[in-house]
Image (cartoon, coloured by chain):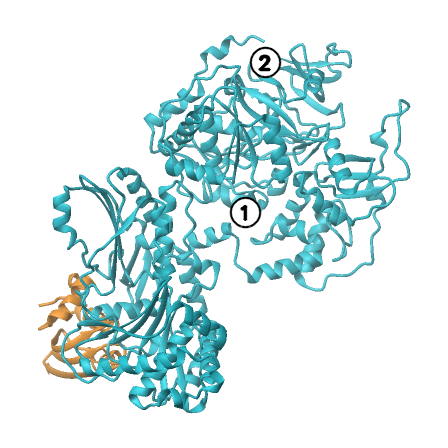
Amino acid sequence: MDLSPLAKVPYFMDAFTKWTVEMPDSRMLVDDQYYKGWTRARVDRASARVYGYLKQHGIGREDFVMICLPRGVFPIIAMIGVWKAGAAFVAVEDTYAPERIEFIRNDCGCKLTIDANLMQKIMNEQEPLEGYERADDHDACFAVYTSGSTGRPKGVLHEYGDIKLDAIAGNVQIEPGARGALIAPLNFVVSIKSLTGVMYAPCCFYIVPLSTVKNPRKLLQYYIENKIVISYLSPSLIRAVGGDLGPYLKIVHTGSEPANGISLDGIKLVNNYAMSEGAFTLCQFEIDKPYDECPVGKPNTPIIQIRLVDEDGNDVPQGETGEIIFENPFFRHYINLPEQTAEALRDGWYHTGDLGRMLPDGNLVLVGRANDMIKIDGNRIEPAEIEAAFKRVTGKEWAAAKGFEKPDQSFVCVYYLGELEQSEDEIRKAMEQSVPYYMIPAFFMQIKEPPLLPNGKLARKELPDPRATIERGEYVAPRTEFEAALCKAFESALGIDNISVTEDFYTLGGSSVAAMKVLSIMNLDDLSAVDIFQGRTVEKIAELYAEKAEATASDVSEYDKEMEARKHPHELVPTHRSVIDYQLFTPTAPMWIFPFLFSFGPDADANRVLEAARMVTINHPIFSTIYEFNEDFDLQQRYDPMRRVRVGIEYMTDAEFEAQRDNLIEPFDVLGSPMIRIRIIKTDSNCYALIVFHHIIMDGMSMQIVFQSFARAYMGQPLELDTYYSYLEDEERLRSSAAFRKAYDYYMENYENVDWCKIIEPDKQEPGNVNKRVVIPTNMTPENLTALEQNCDITRSGFLTAIATLALAKMSGKRDVMTQFAFHNRVTKRKQSAGGFLALLLPLGVRLDKLTTLADLYAEVNKQSSEGIANSVYDWATAQDNPYVDDALALSFENAAITDMTALQVMGAKMEPIDPHNDAALRRNFLQVFETADNITVMLSFMATIYSDERINEFSEALTAVTNRMIEVTDPASVTIAEVLA
Amino acid sequence: MLTINKAQAGTTLTVSLAGRLDTTTAKQFHSEVNDHLEGVTDLVLDCKDLDYISSAGLREFLGACKTVSENGTHVIKNCNDNVLGVFKITKLGGILNIE
């Protein structure tokens, strides 16, 4: 092989560096978490950390590193880092069976495994190392594992020269800035080729989530929404997706299985012939029309030579069929398999086992396999590996696997002798522990004896087609529209009539390709290949789908929903409007503003803190949310990324910072600008992050979400989707729902038309709003509260309601008492990931004359707490609330989690004291309990302009008395309310 | 509680407000002021005794001022510091004519 042209091909790392320097801010990688993408500069910096780590640990030339990370940008970062170190990697999917991963790790002799924990450590702690080692063309570069005929996976070791060879052979013309989609698993050769492509050319690759890949409709949507221009699609996927691939796709590369009968209008469709042993494109053919036998074409470069040989290794005459062989001086060997290497690699020529025929125009056509290897959905499968797995699971001494390959239906059947002890489902589940999903047999067939050739070997071709012997059970017709539609989809995908709702999709010959066809026909966003695989029958799939319809949608559809929701303005939820009104009572007071100051120390990298802060402002829509009056003078909130909070580094001396420290907090405009800020301040001796937000847009849980995001961004970890706008949309929809009406009726029935005592009665009226706080002494401790919870069947929060209710009753003499308790409202996954103000104050009105004992009181509190939460869709408490005139006593039991700052401590950050300068009351009365590991503190905040000290003391004494009496009670049924109030 | 006194001289309507213009009194303002602006070319909202205005109150002000401004003028005057503060932090000073 004449390799001299390779000398003109730039070293791929040189090309990557060139583009990083020239276009540092151009996007290089996008995944479903980092949907804004990673720039080249960022990828370079992150991979430099991996390089630094490997170098420190003495890993370099000829050393193997295993990469076991979830699909996304991080495996790519790790790959580039390993290449910078001049070492080699083997990538595995983190979903592989542990046994398989362990085998590969040992087989390669991996010196190190980069998993999620180590990657986090590297991103967090490792300094980047600039530059890279220059590898020799014959240094080990990467290994890929394919199915092995020994029954174990087989490792193919490639050298660095393959990258240059592919740069010439691939002939992939990509324009700068073009967007490509990566749909194959990242450990496949085609993905590694794509990576080198994006290093050579300044384009961007979108790593498509696998759940999207498996759903043709979603994949098409993904292509359109992300304006994908170039992608690889298998022929099966092209058939499943259909002819219209949207307006943006210009180039589709296909291959790995016969591309017969497909073509695409207006899109350049290129058939590729390549394999794991040649990490470069052997042949290409531009498909201009559907072919019954689609050629795979010819090499793009004269460097690559292909021959067709007979069993003796002699070239066959033109037009005749022979085994395809080619040279690859950079395929070193099969790892630890010298015999197999010698069998496959003879005199420098690799024997593919594929049979081909050369057309008169020089294009190659594939005509079959010379050995037993099967391809299912483009995946190579050696029957021996399936047989070995089956035997391990069943204990059988003999088994045979056979593949059946048709354009739209490919599957594997395993044949065995005698009886099976386990069920087929049990066997499949057990096999999943050691082989990938595409090797799981669709059929198991008992045979009397194996068919043999005259030489005594297995006559695999004579093993019968299991579909001929399928016993069709009793027909059960579909009972719902969904079942009927799914039955029709099955029938269409499998080419079988009258499928019963109880028949197994895979037993009928279904495969993952057929499953995709079903999904395409059904055209439902939340029906996935996993549902078909798990359910298997129409009946069971329908059940799973119905269950899922009630559950939270997948992350991918959450993303779609959130992005869609951000496109429209939304009503304010009642609590937002209420907090605005509270603020307007004392407009310039900072009582609703919460500042947090963090110091990172003198050695902190301010740019890193800044970058993390920027990622946070991008990821969380509250940083771009504007409150405003619309044209109808209704208040609305709107996502406006053009108004996103901007962050930069402010440089000042220590003295300047100290001078300003007391006045760092500025008031917010409640309309027209985001109500949250981040400032990064670098002084001579420290680096600070000041985060200030208004309670209108954040509560305690959201604060934790934002702080955790800050820490994750700092450590280079992906940030979770913020679903705030989806939450707003849900709330809007709920307000016109039957549940809303039901909740409204509940409150009207239980709380209206009662003269509630709901506040410490004011005893003066002075102008202004001045806040005061008193600590109320009680005997509560964490220990006796825990005992109370166990003995009295009441939660801590419920107990606070009970003592506040009785304290108010004791003071006022009234027996109908209402308080409001803080409810976090994070009851669904979507709400748990929403960064906004979701918390509610729920009313709890107790009519003490209807109760006798403390047990009755606790039961009533529990009942109303649950009912309040269940009916919280209608915010009755806020509807009643009139700031500082008709607001009820609010209660909040807070434990350490609310103020947990460990998320920021992992960044090396320390919380610094900062005076919020708040001297205005949030409400007329607010009773808070703070619990730490050792202590319980009860604090009453109140509006001092309407309460004398005497009045507050009266309440304090009442609360102390009832609390200390009740905390010691172990049998609440034996103590009357009257005794406590006496 | 909200007290509304109206004085009309020709096409100029002066509305004096005392108390709170909030959720509970916004409807009262609407029915006594906004629903009676036909023929008014100059609206004066005298807020000397207005203690508090909420978002609901702002909505009514915006509605009234817009109605009049189509063919006339409006002015909001004698606001105390708190009410002025409200206009400041809501940035409505740029839309409403505040003296």
Q: Which of B69 and A69 is in front in this view?
A: A69
Tell me which residue sits at (28%, 68%) in the image: A579
The one nearer the camera, A237 or A773, is: A773
Q: Which mark is residue A846?
A: none
Q: Which chain carries label 2?
A: A
Q: Which of A735 and A252 is in front in this view?
A: A735
Per the rendering, the colour in which chain B appears is orange
Q: Is A31 rendered above or below residue A365?
A: below
**Looking at the picture, which amino acid does disc 2 mark?**
Pro
Q: Left or right of A370: which side holds A762?
A: left
C-alpha gap between disc 1 and disc 2: 41 Å
Res. A248 visible in picture: no
What residue does disc 2 label? Answer: A329
Residue A711 location in percent, x, y? Answer: 36, 46
A33 displayed left or right of A414? left
Callout 2 environment at 10 Å: few (<14), some (14 to 19), or many (20+)? Answer: some
Q: Which of marks 1 and 2 is in front?
A: 2
**Above or below, A945 relative to A69:** below
10 Å neighbourhood of mark 1: few (<14), some, or many (≥20)?
A: many
Task: Give the amino acid type for the residue marked by disc 1 in the picture.
Answer: Lys
Quadrant housing residue A812: bottom left
Which residue corresponds to the image point at 28% horizontal and 42% vertical from the top-left?
A610
Image position, residue A50 (x, y; %): 42, 30
Instruction: Give the labeled residue for mark 1.
Output: A218
Is residue A451 left or right of A201 when viewed as pictured? right
| Chain containing the residue with disc 1 | A
Ranked by sequence position, the earlier of labels 1 and 2 is 1
Q: In which quarter of the image is residue B12?
A: bottom left
Q: Which quarter of the rendering shows the N terminus of chain A?
A: top right
Q: The cyan chain is which one?
A: A
